[in-house]
Image (cartoon, helix red, strand yellow):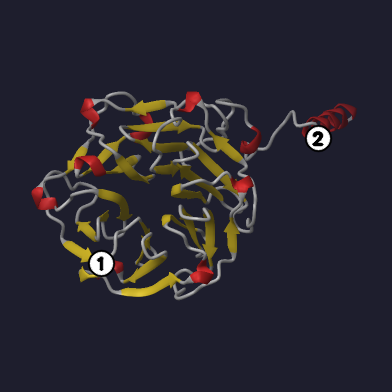
Amino acid sequence: MRRIYAVLALTMVLLVFGCISPRRGGNTVSNGGGGTGGQLYVSTPNSILRYSNAEGSIGNVAPTGTINGAATGLSAPRHLLVDTSADRLYVANQGGSSVLVFDNASTLTGNAAPTRVIAGNATKLVAPVDVALDTTNNLLYVADGTSILVFASASTVNGNAPPVRNINMGITIGALLLDVTNNQLYVSDPGDNAVDRLDGASTQDVVGIVGGAIAGPDTKLAQPRGLALDASGRLIVGNSGTPTSITVYPNASTATADVIPVGNITGTNTRLQSPQQIALNRNVSSGELYVADTLAASILIFTNMSSATGNVAPARVISGANTGLTGSAINGLALDPTR
């Protein structure tokens, strides 16, 4: 009995002084060690960087894998999307007028050829910037200029395949986000400081019918280029304009007009300089947001997104010479918290 009490007492001491940390202690993990899981993919001008232990990585940590070389076909890749169930990475390959698909993404490094390449005149791809995946209807949405090209058989589409639909938005699109459950597609409009919502996304064609648009001075939107949706149906937006910020809007599925954000992360402590694509890790309590910031040459990670607002500092920052991010245009990221 005394031995049991002694063990319990020792355990309490270790917990108090930080010698034992809980699984979600990612904010205090040293560079490159002891991460809690997850794969983070980041696009740079001609490479995809992959960081293992993404939920714990901090500081000047080197990527676990770097996909680059002639065989990859990478040319100015922009936004990324990961299908976690298939371990599959989709790349909006702007410079190559293509969408690249890499299977077994969590294991790739070096001069790895994509499993599939969607490209050719029939695809109508010119300069794709973002992709969204409808796993229910097996559709792939691709933002390209003012259009959203929709490809059938997303899990197998390859080569010079024509889109089954072409949705003209009449704006230069900055980002896409698909809410599969509600069949709604969110489209960022950096030129007009707005986020449009297309209802009944899987049947939209020719001219995009906007069911609701968040726009107006009270929204604080400023060249929005990153979109995420949390479990409570709140829309999270990364704003690359002035002032740079992360803004949060409630009831995204019905929100419209000059909506006042319930959260506005902005100020010098945030280290935001030009946020691009963002990704939300719902597996972490209260939400954990990853931000690709090209001017900061960093990945900024904010926690407690369910309540974060104001001039708050990121809980973790991935930056430094070893990361491969210094001097690079960081345009996109994707997070797979399951591996």
Q: Residue furthest front?
A: 242
Query: At x 64% / y 58%, what residue is drawn?
Result: 307
Q: What's the residue at 23%, 60% (across, down)?
A: 147
* Residue 16 - label: 2
Q: Quadrant of the N terminus?
A: top right
On screen, residue 67 versus residue 124, left or right, reads right
Residue type of the residue flagged with mark 2: Val
Q: Is residue 326 above or below residue 163?
A: above
Assign a secondary structure to mark 2.
Answer: helix
**Residue 55: x and y, percent?**
54, 38
Question: At x 47% / y 28%, what residue is drawn?
Answer: 323
Q: Residue 260 at what x, y percent from top left?
A: 55, 71
| Nearer to the camera, 238 or 85 | 238
First of labels 1, 2 by sequence position: 2
Q: As shown in the figure, which amino acid type bears the numbered disc 1?
A: Gly
Q: Is residue 101 above or below residue 195?
A: above
Give the quadrant of residue 138. bottom left
Q: Mark 1: few, some, or many residues within 10 Å (few <14, many ≥20)?
A: few
Mark linked to residue 112 = none
Which type of secondary structure does the marked residue at label 1 adopt? loop
Give the quarter of the figure containing the C terminus.
Answer: top left
235 with respect to 202 (left or right): right
Q: Residue 168 in the image: x percent, y percent?
A: 22, 66
Return the mark for residue 170: 1
Residue 192 position (above or below residue 290): below
Q: Residue 117, percent across and down?
A: 19, 40
Q: Residues within 10 Å of mark 2 (few under 14, many from 20)?
A: few
